[in-house]
Image (cartoon, helix red, strand yellow):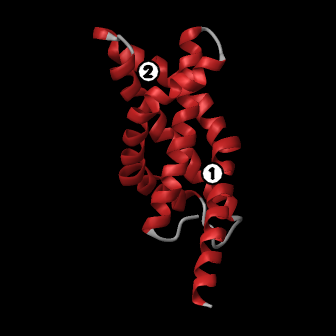
Amino acid sequence: MPKTKFQEVIFTVLMVLVMVYAMICYNISLNVGGLANHVFLSAFHELWFMGPIAFVFDFFIVSHLAFKGARRIADPQKENPFHFILAISCISVAVMCPAMSFIATVFFKDAGKEIIAVWLQTTVINFPMAFFLQIFYAGPLVRAIFKKVLEISGKFKNESIK
């Protein structure tokens, strides 16, 4: 878990890149009728736009809500810290999925006067994927990468002191 603001920025960038890229791939696959090689490249065209939006929203709003809410659900000092991580992940998905689905609806779907219905449908379609992606794949992957980055940066700091 990040301990400084700089670490929070790095962690959030990693999480946003993984989650947003995967969710864009998922949505493009739905739109074209299935997963194909071109989807992975096409997703980069939306990532430049959706990534910064997700970062700002997550870093400045969602992460604070998720930590505050998770503290009400699980106490990492008294129980398994993994419960706290799961609580943060669940709350993050519960807030980020509808928000990012709304942004995607506005910018990438021709919803017109049906914007609320299209947004709700998009959220319902995206939520299971976002939830399971976060809990089982993106969350563990990003935490492992983040841990490695901290270990490597710690080695560099220790070597420069000697």
Q: Residue at position x 39%, y 18% from top?
A: 108
Label 1 element class: helix
Depth check, front residue: 93 or 49 = 49
Residue receiving disc 2: 120
The crowd level at tag 2 (other Cα within 10 Å; few <14, some 14-19, many 20+) is: some
Q: Which amino acid type is marked by label 2? A: Leu
Q: Quadrant of residue 63?
A: bottom left
| Quadrant (top left, top right, bottom left, bottom right) of the C terminus | bottom right
| Quadrant (top left, top right, bottom left, bottom right) of the N terminus | bottom right
Q: Residue furthest left?
A: 113
Q: Report the number of numbered marks.
A: 2
Alpha carbon separation for disc pair 2 and 1: 28 Å
In the image, is residue 40 above or below residue 2?
above
In the image, is residue 110 above or below residue 72?
above
Locate residue 74 relative to residue 47 in the image: left or right. right
In the image, is residue 42 above or below residue 74?
above
Locate residue 132 relative to residue 14 in the image: left or right. right
Q: Residue at position x 54%, y 47% from top?
A: 15
Image x and y of residue 25, in percent: 57, 25
**Nearer the N terminus, badge 2 or badge 1?**
2
In the image, is residue 28 above or below residue 91?
above
Q: Quadrant of residue 19?
A: top right
Residue receiving disc 1: 142
Image x and y of residue 37, in percent: 65, 19
Image x and y of residue 152, in percent: 65, 69
